[in-house]
């Protein structure tokens, strides 16, 4: 039996209308109708919610429906691909800003170094770190790995100072110095603030979604 027929049969046994199910899931009645008539397939999240709503196992809903299983596999792969692409974009945006900051230093190293330091280390890098971290915090695709990114941003902040002023001093006076490990602190703090903001936004959206589904 196809999943559409199973969903309709199970809903009928539960004594629920399409409108009631749609209200529980926070979607349109037409979407429920399309699922039950096999005009479209529910996504994996909806399948899980329907399983809970109808008090039936996932195995019972999906058993022997090869088309639905194929759809879920393709949907899952598509979601994973989008998540990977999103992560790459977030990191690449930051790295481009970081690289541009370093290049600008060396292109204008005979200019106003104090002005450069104020703009880059007190504005550009902290703000870009904060904003990118907000997006990472909102992105569930990172899961708990997002907190590892604190070290990444801290390291890049430290490296920015080393790749500019420290190397410039080495070139001018020949005294090679190791990076100052304490320079990672500003990057970590800015990233932590962004992560918490992003995680908070994600939690609020999830809570509103659950509230909408309960109404």
Image (cartoon, rainbow, N blue to C red):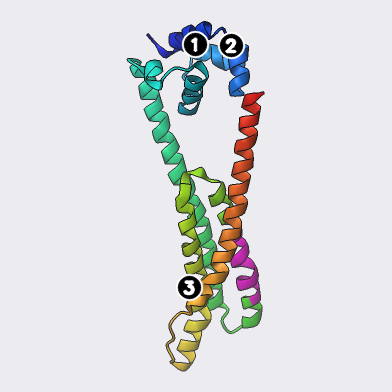
In space, the residues marked 1 and 3 are separated at their CA atoms by 57 Å
Q: Earlier in the sequence, mark 3 or mark 2?
A: 2
Q: Residue at x 47, y 12 (%)?
A: 7
Pick the front one: 88 or 51 = 51
Residue of label 2:
18
Q: Earlier in the sequence, mark 1 or mark 3?
A: 1
Residue 123 is one of the magenta-drawn residues: yes
Q: Which residues are magenta?
A: 118-130
Direction from residue 187 to residue 47 in the image, left or right: left
Main SS of residues in magenta: helix
Which label sits in the foreground, 1 or 3? 1
Direction from residue 144 to residue 211 in the image, left or right: right
Vertical arrangement, residue 155 with respect to residue 43, above or below: below
Which label sits in the foreground, 2 or 1? 2
- Give residue 118's position: percent from left, percent from top: 65, 75
Q: Residues within 10 Å of mark 2 (few under 14, many from 20)?
A: some
Q: Are marks 2 and 1 in contact (CB under 8 Å)?
A: yes
Q: Residue at x 41, y 33 (%)?
A: 76
Q: Residue at x 52, y 6 (%)?
A: 12
- Give residue 165's position: percent from left, percent from top: 53, 82
Vertical arrangement, residue 59 with respect to residue 203, above or below: above
Residue of label 1:
36
The N terminus - image quarter: top left
């Amino acid at each position: 039996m196809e999943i559409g027929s199973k969903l309709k049969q199970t809903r009928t046994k539960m004594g629920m209308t399409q409108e009631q199910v749609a209200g529980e899931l926070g979607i349109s009645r037409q979407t429920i109708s399309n699922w039950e008539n096999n005009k479209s397939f529910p996504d994996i999240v909806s399948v899980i919610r329907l399983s809970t709503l109808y008090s039936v196992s996932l195995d019972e809903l999906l058993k022997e429906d090869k088309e639905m299983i194929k759809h879920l596999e393709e949907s899952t792969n598509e979601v994973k691909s989008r998540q990977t692409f999103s992560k790459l974009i977030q990191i690449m945006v930051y790295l481009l800003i970081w690289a541009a900051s370093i290049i600008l230093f060396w292109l204008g190293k005979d200019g106003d170094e104090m002005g450069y330091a104020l703009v880059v280390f007190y504005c550009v890098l902290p703000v870009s770190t904060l904003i990118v971290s907000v997006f990472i915090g909102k992105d569930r695709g990172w899961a708990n790995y997002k907190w590892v990114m604190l070290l990444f941003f801290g390291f890049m902040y430290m490296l920015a100072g080393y790749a500019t002023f420290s190397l410039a001093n080495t070139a001018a006076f020949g005294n090679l110095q190791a990076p100052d490990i304490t320079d990672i602190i500003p990057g970590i703090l800015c990233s932590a603030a962004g992560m918490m903001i992003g995680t908070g936004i994600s939690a609020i959206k999830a809570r509103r979604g659950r509230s909408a589904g309960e109404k």
